Image (cartoon, rainbow, N blue to C red):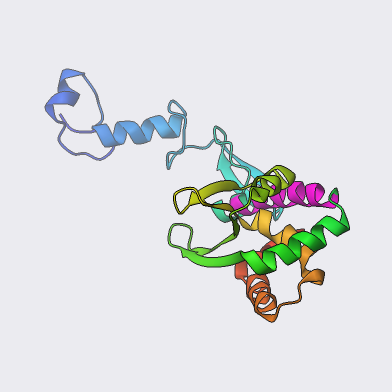
Amino acid sequence: MICKDCNKKLGKFAKNNHSIRCLSCAIKFQWKSGIRKGTGKYSRRKKIKKCLLCRQKFIIYSHEKKQFCNIHHSQLYHTIITYNETKQLLNKLSKEFLIWFTGFWEGEGSLVREYNKFNKHYHFTMSISQVDNIIYYFRKKFKFGKINKYLKGECLGWTFGGVGHILPLIQIMNPYIKINKRKIQIRKFLKDKYVKELLKYV
């Protein structure tokens, strides 16, 4: 016996199941006829959607729940949500507190820029280290980040990462920064490719 579509000799499995097609041709036939549903090459169930971020049109299969044209835009969209939430939180803080916090960060804080091999862009972290329990006060006030203990618990560090948290804080702190070293760090941060792209949407 031979396959009805490709004229190849049928195997034992096809003969035992009284099939008129080989396995590969049978699968193709099922995609074409709509018996199978999914992302197969022969599936006809497609629809057009608009990316939530850039509003460009892209094609998906009917069973898929994609809302973005690529993974990068998905990450950027969620960063924008974090940015807006952080900005609303910071707007509730008093000017006097922010000036005092900026001075504290200039003396005891840091802004670290590291390359992330997984998502192929630079990752930023801000932190403040101090022996005093004031670190817990900062964590309670800002409501993000985590507290770590160093030197057998003698030193505390409040650390947070993600452009969505760091960018709105830097935008508010920027007018009050006086030390040149910190100004240079912030300029480098604002020149980052991912930060620039984020600023287009906020």
Q: Is residue 92 left or right of residue 147?
A: right
Considering depth in this image, is 25 or 46 the residue closer to the camera? 46
Dominant secondary-structure state across the stretch colored magenta: helix
Any magenta on residue 64?
no
State whether residue 112 appears in this view.
yes
- Which quadrant holds the N terminus? top left
Residue that appears at 81% across and 63% down? 99
The location of residue 194, given as percent across then percent down, is 62, 65
The location of residue 144, given as percent across then percent down, is 66, 45
Name of the residue lying farthest toward the bottom: 180
Decide: is 36 above or below 183.
above
The location of residue 140, given as percent across then percent down, is 70, 42
- Write down the region rendered in magenta: 75-91
Q: Is residue 181 left or right of residue 15?
A: right
State whether residue 69 appears in this view.
no
Residue that appears at 74% across and 49% down? 86
